[in-house]
Amino acid sequence: QVQLVESGGGLVQAGGSLRLSCAASGNIFSINTLGWYRQAPGKQRDLVATITSSGSTNYANSVKGRFTISRDNAKNTGYLQMNSLAPEDTAVYYCNLVIRDSRGFRSAYWGQGTQVTVSS
């Protein structure tokens, strides 16, 4: 059993910053890919950024240069540093982790989501 807990969302003015965290606990041997997604009202859930176990990152064009994804493997935690936030970044942000458990099985897990609201 694996649990993900997200934190760090909130209300911020345009141009501000937020840092999201996603902490995983439970039967975890290793975390493979870690990703952040977001879903605005009435829209589909879109990829924001991913980071592999080796540290390779990938970003949506809309956040390149403003957002930074990182991870702390010792803490089983992922982060999304969001700078220069704009109203169009308003959404519920979800983390997604591909986790290998002690038996060697890999499964994907979603966080509960955290609301980010950017006011103009």
Image (cartoon, rainbow, N blue to C red):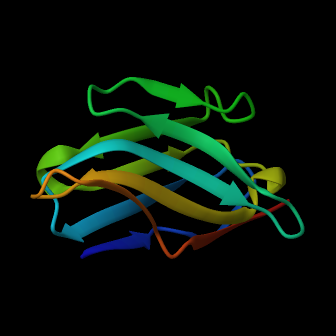
Q: Horizontal placement of 96 versus 55: left or right?
A: right
Q: Horizontal placement of 112 versus 21: left or right?
A: right
Indicate whether 79 appears above or below 58. Answer: below
Give the quadrant of residue 70.
top left
Decide which of 67, 96 is in the foreground and name it: 96
Residue at point 27%, 33% (across, down): 53
Residue at point 73%, 64% (across, down): 91
Looking at this rendering, what residue extends furthest in the right direction? Answer: 42
Q: Horizontal placement of 42 versus 50: left or right?
A: right
Give how far across and how far down residue 82 sits, in percent. 56, 47
Decide which of 90, 16 is in the foreground and name it: 90
Residue at point 65%, 44% (across, down): 47
Decide which of 79, 4 is in the foreground and name it: 4
Give how far across and how far down residue 31 sits, in percent. 25, 47
Q: How many marks?
A: 0
Q: Horizontal placement of 98 versus 35: left or right?
A: left
Indicate whether 117 appears above or below 70. Answer: below
Residue at point 82%, 56% (across, down): 87
Quadrant position of the C terminus in the picture: bottom right
Give the quadrant of residue 59.
top right
